[in-house]
Image: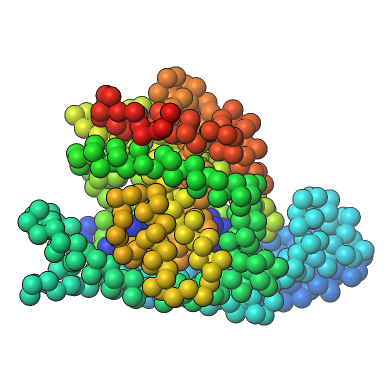
Amino acid sequence: MMKKKLLTITLSVILAFAFTLTGCGEEAPIGADVTKNVAGVEYYHYDPADFNAMCDELEDLATGDDAKAIIETYDKLYAECEELDTLYSVIYVMYSTDVTNDYYSKEQLYSYDKLEKCCDKLCAVCRKVTEGPCAEQFKEHVGKDAFDVFAEYEPMSKREKELTKKEKKLVDEYYDVIEEAEKATYTYKGEDWDFDRINSDEGAELSMSDYEGYVEIFDGLQKIANDSAGPIFLKLVQIRNELAKLNGYDNYAAYADEQEYCRDYTEDEIRQLHKDVKKIAKPYFISYYNSYDEQVTSNMSTKKLLQTLQKYTAEVDELASSSCQQMIDENLFSIGDESCRQDGAFTTYIRKANRPFISMTLDEQRDFIVLSHEFGHFTEYNNETQTNILTDSDNIDLAEIASNGLQGLMTHFYDEIYKVQKDAAKRDAVGELLENVIDGCVEDEFQRAVYENPDMTLEEINALYAKTYSEYNEWAEGDPGYSWVYISHNFEAPMYYISYTVSALAALQIWNQSTKNFDKGVKTWEKFIDYGTYNQTYLDIVEKCGLLKFTDKGAVKKICRPALKAISTEKDYNYGFEN
């Protein structure tokens, strides 16, 4: 899954509810040795002195009539921004494989800061070029769309830069405290319990013999994390709302919809989506609690995972097959289970190498689902034409369709991949897409309420989360509402979550098509890949690909019904819908 960083920098991130970072050095990862390079690119500490001097030179040229010098200087500066973008992607991959490394931690902060400041400075100077004597020649060189963005560009104020820097430091502080919280213990009846113990067979036995004690321990451990991470979130809410107001918006939620994610649906349509999804949430959770009694394990080594992906992408289409071969041949991935590795998975783009790259932490139960999801992003990146890093906008809603769509298509091969566990594995994969629909709305509704009421205390926020989640899942009634701190997107990528919902609604339609006519499902997925994600809008592309839009009356129910049926093992089950 993907998250927007800044400008057009994107990382795709698997939803992670818990963190397991305790140390390093267990088993060597498979794929690239990222301590040396990422996709053939080595990291170095960038000095912006020459860049700043060149920007000053372009600013002086902007009022003159030497178009050739303006264009040549702009091209050099643009190349430097691409270099910085590449360096940030490289150091973030390195950091994600060892979050305990102080150098990686400091350098990914430094690189992010320099990328943001350099791009901002160049855009501000380009605006002066659009107002100068050589504006027409400059427009011809960069293109009308880019020229129009430069012409309207408002450089970041000193206060915006300060706030953005504070925001990034708080996000990194969050990862530190949540890691420490994972090591905490809760004492019950004289015994210390940690997450490893409560999630083990011993914890399962306790839940059968002393359920109240089991709940007390689990809630106690979560409260430790909530108490540690919650105050960071309160600060982030204040910072982000101030940033939004500096840009003319009432709150950060409204700002993010328009400026960060370029959504072509309204806040009213999102709130209606919340209501529609609540209607399918009840039958989902009935199936979840009644049917999900078999634990699926991929039971594959990393090498076997890659061989399996290679075998079945060859049966999807040539684009997926060739991308997979390239990923393996060029070591464009790093997969491991070292405990110092950042939990989850993401796909990023190494611009200078013109290559995508996957970083992934192994999870025995979901390895193939995660890998096929991330490989959907990899394939989409591999098919994307180069974009202007300064001016083009990446539509995250569409990017997630590439990954979720392939995840659904891969269930076509689960009979062979999972054999005796095939039915349970299909329920897991399809159920996860339904879970994305629901979780996306839960987190979005929660976050909107927080940013619209930014002065809430941590206790009030916990109560809000508990109330919001219980409206989707009635079995969660009585939950204390601590668990939201484990969802990193609340801290690092606010207002992203609705993208999971809308992309999964499209992916479920691709999956449903593939169950009836596999080739038709593949062709629909290919259409999304061909349209790409840059400078596109979600509803427009969904319609062009021949799918239902969630804004159509009754669409959510119609889209989700086949999936709800697929995850239920009860023949006479009516999927919980009222007639």
Compared to residue 543, the image places residue 116 above or below, namely below
Tell me the quarter of the picture where residue 254 sits. bottom right
**Residue at figure coordinates x 80%, y 65% from the top left:** 127
Say whether residue 72 is left or right of residue 214: right
Tell me the quarter of the picture where residue 482 sits. bottom left
Return the x and y of residue 267 as percentages of the image width and height: 61, 52
Q: Residue furthest top?
A: 517
Return the x and y of residue 107 as percentages of the image width and height: 47, 73
Compared to residue 452, the image places residue 567 above or below, namely above
Q: Nearer the viewer, residue 538 or 374?
A: 538
Q: Nearer the viewer, residue 434 or 514?
A: 434
Return the x and y of residue 169 as percentages of the image width and height: 48, 76
For the question of whether residue 20 can be seen, the reply is: yes
Q: Nearer the viewer, residue 338 or 256?
A: 256
Q: Residue furthest front?
A: 579
**Residue at figure coordinates x 13%, y 58% from the top left:** 211
Task: Report the label total.
Answer: 0
Q: Say which quadrant the C terminus sits in.
A: top left
Q: Nearer the viewer, residue 424 or 114?
A: 424
Return the x and y of residue 553 as percentages of the image width and height: 57, 34
**Residue at figure coordinates x 48%, y 27% from the top left:** 522
Say whether residue 115 is left or right of residue 133: left
Compared to residue 198, the image places residue 521 above or below, namely above
**Residue at figure coordinates x 59%, y 39% from the top left:** 551
For the question of whether residue 122 can be seen, the reply is: no
Tell me the quarter of the picture where residue 476 sits. bottom left
Say whether residue 382 is left or right of residue 537: left
Colour pattern: rainbow
Compared to residue 24, the image places residue 206 above or below, namely above
